[in-house]
Amino acid sequence: MKTMKTKTSPKMAVNLGPLKLNNPVMTASGTFGYGEEYAGYLDLSRLGAVVVKGLSLKPRLGNPPPRIMETSGGMLNSIGLQNIGVDAFIEEKLPFLRKYNTAVVANIYGETYDEFKQVAKKLSSAKGVHALEVNISCPNVKKGGVSFGADPKVAAIVTRTVKDETGLPVIVKLTPNVTDVAAVAVAVEKAGADIISLINTLTGMSVDLKTRRPHLKNITGGLSGPAIKPVALRMVWQVLQKVSIPVIGIGGIMTAEDALEFLILGAKAVQIGTANFINPCATLDIIEGIKIYLADNGIKDINEIIGTFRP
């Protein structure tokens, strides 16, 4: 990726309602650790936001290995939301992130409404957290393990539960594993979501021909990477037609060109996930590539191109 050579760099700041970002490029939860793991490769202050690994009320070991499998055009993972727990994050990881001039978004999840409530409450009083991203792709144990995000009514309850416990902007991250993602988006908007992010991973699996067993111990896993970008673009477009709150596009973004597709559709920001595993500096390359595109096309402000899609 070549470096910007123009004298005046395009303006890159974006506003997602109450959440202000230096630029529209964020990391995706689960692919960037707690930020510290990538600090040796890039200046975190240059990112629009760091979205940390999903946080639960108590530490979680996740699923047994093998739990990652490379596929054509992407990867499958069944990490199982392994994390150190919200208390350890606040005590051990957040002080490091406070040193950087970038927004910190805490991704949260629970297996019950009360767990979402408690995690949100703890993070809301922690210095240095700028927004909460609610993962409704996780299982609702009181509903037989069905995803919170599979039912618009249940997704709305989770959203309202978190909103009632925090003054921070609330981002609700939607699962693509539903019949009508726009219906879920409308439900969480009505319940008070400030921002919507999508998509989370698509459910997939892979078979080992030698053993005739699944490559993943959990059998199924989440598919991410370039293979899912067309699906992500379609779902983001569908949601943009139905909601008025800001939308963050996620799914298969590897290059600046990929990111620009989501921005042109109308997404106010994007999240970079699997690309971080291939290139630890992928986020910075994408930011720089967007600047070059804007400069080459005589665009002085990133906001001039957001939502300019012509169907």
Image (spheres, rainbow, N blue to C red):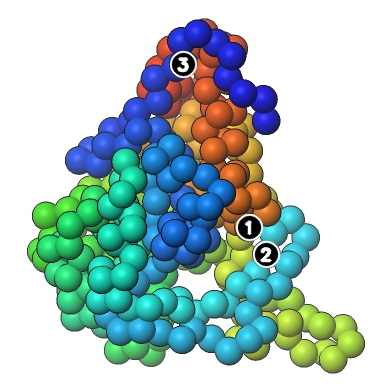
Point out residue 218 in the picture as x, y percentages from the top left corner: 60, 86
Q: Secondary structure at mark 1?
A: helix
The dot on residue 75 is 2
Q: Tell me what residue is drawn at x 67 percent, y 25 percent.
A: 2
Do tag 2 and tag 1 residues touch (Cβ < 8 Å)?
Answer: yes
Q: Amino acid at mark 2?
A: Met
Residue type marked 1: Phe
Q: Compute the Cα span from label 2 to label 3.
A: 35 Å
Q: Quadrant of the N terminus?
A: top right
Q: Secondary structure at mark 3?
A: loop
Tell me the kind of residue under disc 3: Ser
Circle 1 sits on which residue?
A: 277
Q: Nearer the viewer, residue 116 or 149?
A: 116
Residue 92 x %, y %: 31, 70
Disc 2: CA contacts within 10 A as few (<14), some (14-19) or many (>=20)? many
Pointer 2 or 1: first along the chain = 2
